[in-house]
Image (spheres, grey):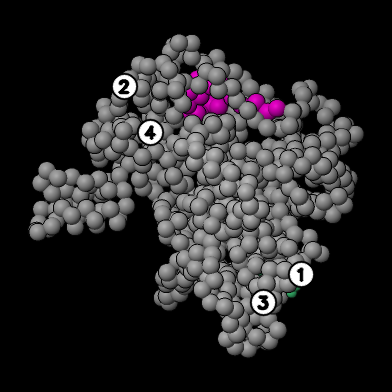
C-alpha cells in the first residue's frame, strides 16, 4: 500500500506533464463528484446548468438573447444559443481547434475573451469540458462565419474532426449531450421541474434573456386558462414547455416569490449599483412573519450566505433604525429592537458579482470575500435611506411592522423559555408521546419522527427499543413558513421535537447566523419516516423546512435522515420481495413468477400503517437492512426552496405542482 502511494507521488513529481494529466478529463471521469458535486440527481442536472452558464456568459457579454433547452426522448439534453458560436479555427499554441480546446480542457472557457467580465461559469467553474467528460455522446454544432460546423465526442474524446456540414446565416452554439450511465449509476432521467426551477431563477437573475425549456419525452394534455381563471383542457396533446423571461429581473422575482402574500408596500424596493462590485437587490415586506432571503454570487445560490448577506442585513437595519429614530417613530416603544425584527415578513433577493469569489463553508457556497460586506452594506443603506425619505407613508408602515415584530419577539422569548425550561434533566419532562429508548449514548441513539399515531404504534412495536425512540407527530406539522415565531413555539409538535432532542432554540450571532448548542443532543440520528406517497412527501418536506429554518445546525452536522419504506411487496407462496422502484417490482415478479406467474401477488403499500411491525422493522428500521438517505445542506435547501417557492401560500397552481410531484424535489442519497 504505502509503496504504491509513494510510487504514485514520485511519478507525479517526475514529469511536468502529469499536471496536465491531472487537469485532463480523465481526472473528471475518475472523481466526478469533485467536479460536479455528486453523481446523483443533483450532479446529473448540474451538467445542464454548466452548459447553460456558458450561454448566460455569452448573453452577459452582449452577444446572445435566447437560450433553448430541450430534454430529448432518450434523456439527452440539447442547449442552443444565438451567441457568437464557439470559435472553430486553429488554436495557435494547442495545435487543435479552439472548439476542441473549449471542450477538452478544464477551465478553458474564458481563456480567449479577456475583456469580458466573466462572472458566471457554474458552481464548480469547470465548464463544458466537464460535461463532455461525463457524456457518452456530445455533439457540438456551431453556426459561424456562414457555415455549420459539427464535431462529436464520446467520454471527452473527439470521435470526429470538426466537419462543415452546411451553410448558415446565423450564429450560435448547440451542445447536445447524453449523460454517461456508467458515471450516473443512480439515474439518468431528467426532471422537468428541477430544470424549470433553475432556469426560471436564471431568467430572473439575468433580465432580458429568454430561456425556453421543452420536454420531448412525452406529450401532455394542453390546458388554457380562461379569463375567469379556470383551467380547461383543449383536447390537444403537446410537449410540455415553458418560456422564462424577465424584463425587470429581481423585482419580478420578488413578485413571483411573494405571489399571494399580502404586501406591506406597493412595490419592491430595489438596490442597484456597480460602484465597487455589481450589486442587484430587491426586497419587499409582506404581512407574514417569515424571513426569506435568497442570496446569489455570480448566479450561484449561496445557501450558507456569507459576507454579502451579512452586509445586506447590516445596511438594512442601520438605515431603518436611523430613519425611525430621526423621525421619532419609536417614542412609544419601550423595548429594544434586535436585528431580526427588521426582517420579519421580509422577502429579499441579493445578487452580487464578484470577480474572484472565495467560497467557504461545507457546501462551498458561503461567500468569504471581506470587501463584499461593506460594499453591500453601503449600497443597501444608501438605497434604503433614499426610499424611506421619498416614501414617508411606506416608511411608517415598515417601522410599525418592525415594532410589532419586536413586541412579538418578547412574547416569543417567553414561549421559548417554556421550551427551554422543559429541557430534559435525565429523562424527566419528556413529551408523553415519546417512546424513548433505553440506551443514553447519543451516538448510538436514533429518533424516528413518524407521521400519525397509527404508524407510530407500528413503529413502537417493530423498533429496537434499546437504541430507537419513536415520536409520533400529529398529521401535518405547522407550516413554519407562515407562522410567527411565537406561534411556532406554541405548537405542541414543535415543542415536542425540541424537548425530545434535548436542544434549545438557535440564537443569532454577530454576523447574523443562527447557531444552536448541540452538546445535549440526545440522538445523533433523527429519522423522518413518512408514507411513501404524496401526502407523506409533503409532510417530510414540512418537517425538513422546519429543521432548515430552526435547526440548521442539525442538518449541517449530518444528523437528519429520511427513511425509505418500500413501495411494493411481491409475493409467491412463502417467497417475498420488497421493492422500492417499479423496475424492482417488475424484476421480482418475473423472477418469482418463473414457470407459472400464477400465485404472484403484488401489494402496493400505501402507507406505513399497512405494514406489520415485523415488515416495518425488516424493510425500513433495521440498521442492518434499511437504506437511510442522509439530508445534506444542498438537498434541504432545495426542499426548502421548492417548498417555499411553491407552497409558501396556498396559491392553487403551486398546490397542483406539489400534487403532481409525488417525490421530493431533489432529495437523493
Ligand atoms: C470561447 C470563446 C468565445 C465564445 C465561447 C467560447 C462560447 C462558448 C459557449 C458555450 C455555449 N455557448 C457558447 N458560446 C460561446 C468568443 C468567441 C469570439 O470571440 O467570437
Rendered position, 346 above or below 100: above
Residue 418 lies in quadrant: top right
Dot 1 or dot 2, earlier in sequence: 1
Q: Which residue is mark 3?
A: 88
Q: Magenta region: which residues?
A: 488-509
In this rendering, which labeled residue sits more in front, label 1 or label 2?
Answer: 1
Near-viewer residue (348 or 30)? 30
**Closer to the N terminus: mark 4 or mark 1?**
1
Q: Left or right: 138 with respect to 569?
A: right
Of badges 3 and 1, nearer the viewer stands: 3
Q: Nearer the viewer, mark 4 or mark 1?
A: 1
Q: Mark 1 sits on what residue?
A: 62
Please name the residue that numbered disc 2 is placed on. Answer: 465
Alpha carbons under labels 3 and 2: distance apart: 67 Å
- The dot on residue 450 is 4
Whether the magenta-drawn stretch holds residue 76 is answered as no
Residue 386, relative to residue 56: is it above or below? above
Amino acid at each position: 500500500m504505502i509503496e504504491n502511494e509513494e510510487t504514485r507521488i514520485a511519478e507525479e513529481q517526475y514529469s511536468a506533464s502529469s499536471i496536465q494529466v491531472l487537469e485532463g478529463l480523465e481526472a473528471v471521469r475518475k472523481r466526478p463528484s469533485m467536479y460536479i458535486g455528486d453523481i446523483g440527481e443533483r450532479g446529473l442536472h448540474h451538467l445542464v446548468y454548466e452548459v447553460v452558464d456558458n450561454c448566460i456568459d455569452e448573453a452577459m457579454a452582449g452577444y446572445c438573447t435566447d437560450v433553448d433547452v430541450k430534454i430529448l426522448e432518450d434523456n439527452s439534453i440539447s442547449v442552443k444559443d444565438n451567441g457568437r458560436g464557439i470559435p472553430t479555427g486553429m488554436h495557435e499554441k494547442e495545435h487543435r481547434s479552439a472548439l476542441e480546446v473549449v471542450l477538452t480542457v478544464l477551465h478553458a472557457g474564458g481563456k480567449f475573451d479577456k475583456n469580458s467580465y466573466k462572472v458566471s461559469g457554474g458552481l464548480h467553474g469547470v465548464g463544458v469540458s466537464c460535461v463532455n467528460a461525463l457524456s457518452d455522446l456530445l455533439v457540438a454544432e456551431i453556426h459561424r462565419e456562414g457555415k455549420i460546423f459539427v464535431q462529436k465526442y464520446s467520454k471527452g474524446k473527439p470521435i470526429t474532426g470538426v466537419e462543415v456540414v452546411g451553410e448558415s446565416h446565423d450564429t450560435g452554439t448547440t451542445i447536445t449531450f447524453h449523460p454517461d450511465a456508467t458515471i450516473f449509476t443512480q439515474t439518468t432521467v431528467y426532471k422537468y421541474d428541477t430544470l424549470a426551477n433553475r432556469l426560471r431563477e436564471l431568467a430572473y437573475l439575468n433580465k432580458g434573456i429568454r430561456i425556453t425549456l421543452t420536454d420531448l419525452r412525452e406529450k401532455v394534455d394542453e390546458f388554457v386558462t380562461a379569463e375567469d381563471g379556470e383551467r380547461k383542457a383543449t383536447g390537444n396533446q403537446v410537449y410540455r414547455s415553458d418560456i422564462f423571461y424577465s424584463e425587470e429581473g429581481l423585482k419580478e422575482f420578488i413578485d413571483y416569490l411573494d405571489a399571494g402574500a399580502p404586501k406591506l408596500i406597493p412595490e419592491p424596493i430595489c438596490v442597484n449599483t456597480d460602484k465597487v462590485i455589481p450589486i442587484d437587490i430587491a426586497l419587499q415586506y409582506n404581512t407574514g412573519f417569515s424571513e426569506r432571503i435568497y442570496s446569489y454570487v455570480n448566479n450561484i445560490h449561496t445557501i450558507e450566505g456569507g459576507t454579502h448577506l451579512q452586509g445586506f442585513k447590516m445596511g438594512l437595519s442601520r438605515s431603518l433604525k436611523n430613519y425611525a429614530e430621526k423621525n421619532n417613530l419609536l417614542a412609544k416603544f419601550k423595548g429594544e429592537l434586535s436585528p431580526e425584527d427588521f426582517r420579519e415578513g421580509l422577502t429579499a433577493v441579493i445578487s452580487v458579482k464578484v470577480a474572484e469569489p472565495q467560497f467557504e463553508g461545507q457546501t462551498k457556497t458561503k461567500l468569504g470575500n471581506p470587501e463584499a460586506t461593506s460594499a453591500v452594506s453601503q449600497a443597501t443603506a444608501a438605497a434604503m435611506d433614499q426610499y424611506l425619505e421619498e416614501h414617508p407613508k411606506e416608511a411608517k408602515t415598515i417601522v410599525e411592522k418592525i415594532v410589532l415584530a419586536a413586541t412579538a419577539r418578547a412574547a416569543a422569548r417567553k414561549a421559548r423559555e417554556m421550551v427551554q425550561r422543559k429541557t430534559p434533566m435525565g429523562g424527566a419532562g419528556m413529551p408523553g408521546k415519546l417512546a424513548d429508548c433505553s440506551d443514553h449514548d447519543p451516538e448510538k441513539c436514533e429518533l424516528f419522527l413518524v407521521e400519525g399515531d397509527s404508524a407510530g404504534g407500528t413503529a413502537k412495536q417493530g423498533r429496537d427499543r434499546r437504541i430507537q425512540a419513536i415520536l409520533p407527530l400529529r398529521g401535518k406539522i405547522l407550516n413554519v413558513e407562515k407562522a410567527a415565531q411565537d406561534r411556532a413555539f406554541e405548537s405542541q409538535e414543535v415543542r415536542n421535537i425540541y424537548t425530545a432532542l434535548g436542544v434549545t432554540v438557535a440564537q443569532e450571532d454577530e454576523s447574523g447566523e443562527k447557531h444552536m448548542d448541540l452538546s445535549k443532543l440526545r440522538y445523533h440520528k433523527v429519522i423522518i419516516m413518512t408514507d411513501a406517497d404524496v401526502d407523506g412527501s409533503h409532510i417530510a418536506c414540512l418537517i425538513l423546512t422546519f429543521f432548515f429554518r430552526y435547526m440548521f445546525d442539525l442538518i449541517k452536522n449530518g444528523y437528519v435522515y429520511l427513511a425509505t419504506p418500500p413501495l411494493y411487496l411481491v409475493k409467491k407462496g412463502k417467497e417475498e420481495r420488497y421493492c422500492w422502484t417499479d423496475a424492482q417490482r417488475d424484476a421480482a415478479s418475473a423472477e418469482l413468477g418463473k414457470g407459472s406467474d400464477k400465485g404472484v401477488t403484488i401489494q402496493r403499500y400505501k402507507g406505513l400503517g399497512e405494514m406489520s411491525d415485523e415488515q416495518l422493522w425488516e424493510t425500513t428500521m433495521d440498521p442492518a437492512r434499511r437504506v437511510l438517505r442522509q439530508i445534506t445542506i444542498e438537498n434541504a435547501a432545495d426542499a426548502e426552496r421548492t417548498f417555499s417557492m411553491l407552497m409558501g401560500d396556498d396559491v392553487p397552481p403551486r398546490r397542483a405542482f406539489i400534487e403532481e410531484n409525488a417525490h421530493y424535489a431533489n432529495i437523493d442519497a
